[in-house]
Image (cartoon, helix red, strand yellow):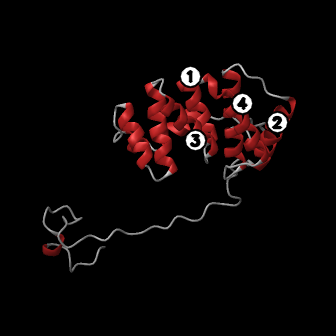
Amino acid sequence: MPNPASRTYSLKIDLAGLLGRATRPFRSRLPRDVEGLLAAYARAEHEAEQVEIATALAATRCDDPRVRAVLRGLLGGRSPGTAARLLVEHGDRAALPELVRALDGVLSQPVADCATCHVEDVHTLARAIEAFGGRLTPGQRAGIAEATVRAAATWEPWKPPAGPPPPAVLRLLRVGRNEPCPCGSGRKYKRCCVGATPA
């Protein structure tokens, strides 16, 4: 087995897998029509619920200005990368200027909790801009490279603990009074060998 410390690691992100697993149980309770989804979005109190409802709205591919407003509104929240992915799925090319502003905002003021999440948002926003035919400025490219380097510097591969493993503790299992006797007689332990000492 190769030594993990000798490898060069690259940062690969499976956004679809991460976002798809995030709140799957909530998705089954969503209404199926656009009006119902918009009403549910208006009632949603938590951003995780709003993101799930927005995901369902993007999947409808409905050309409704209210749906576009919901998807664009997520760009200013805690998950701009998710909003960018949903805008691309929905096909809202008119959101390109807002995507560029969101990328500039995230590069200057990260909204993610950690460097890895920040770089996920930045890369997703950049891919969304390019998917709609936009071009990144040299300053944006430099900011993306800096965020990627910062995230890679904080990542550490797993290292096994040093030294021998702790000794295994053997525990003798106690036989319950109503369980079959371990001597093999077929009788309950309390009626067979409960008083006898094992040899």
Give the image location of residue 176, x and y in percent.
24, 71
Q: CA distance from mark 4 to mark 2?
A: 12 Å
- Determine the secondary structure under disc 2: helix
Write the residue at 47% across / 27% down. Answer: 64
For the residue marked with disc 1, what is the amino acid?
A: Gly
Give the image location of residue 95, x and y in percent.
63, 28
Write the residue at 27% across / 78% down. Answer: 197
Task: Please report contact status of discs 4 and 2: CB closer than 8 Å, yes or no.
Answer: no
Residue 31 is drawn in which quadrant?
top left
> Residue 126, labelled with which disc?
4
- Determine the secondary structure under disc 4: helix
Q: CA distance from mark 3 to mark 4?
A: 16 Å
- Determine the secondary structure under disc 1: loop
Give the residue number, with chain letter if any, for mark 1: 91
Give the residue number, with chain letter if any, for mark 3: 74
Q: Give whichever of 89, 42 is nearer the camera.
A: 42
Task: Please report contact status of discs 3 and 2: CB closer than 8 Å, yes or no.
Answer: no
Q: CA distance from mark 1 to mark 2?
A: 27 Å
Give the image location of residue 155, x and y in percent.
73, 47
Q: Give whichever of 150, 8 is nearer the camera.
A: 150
For the residue marked with disc 4, what is the amino acid?
A: Ala
Q: Give the mark, 3 or 2, whose residue is nearer the N terminus.
A: 3
- Determine the secondary structure under disc 3: helix
> For the residues carrying marks 4 and 2, which lies nearer the camera in this image?
4
Task: Please report contact status of discs 1 and 2: CB closer than 8 Å, yes or no.
Answer: no
Q: Give the mark, 4 or 1, whose residue is nearer the N terminus.
A: 1
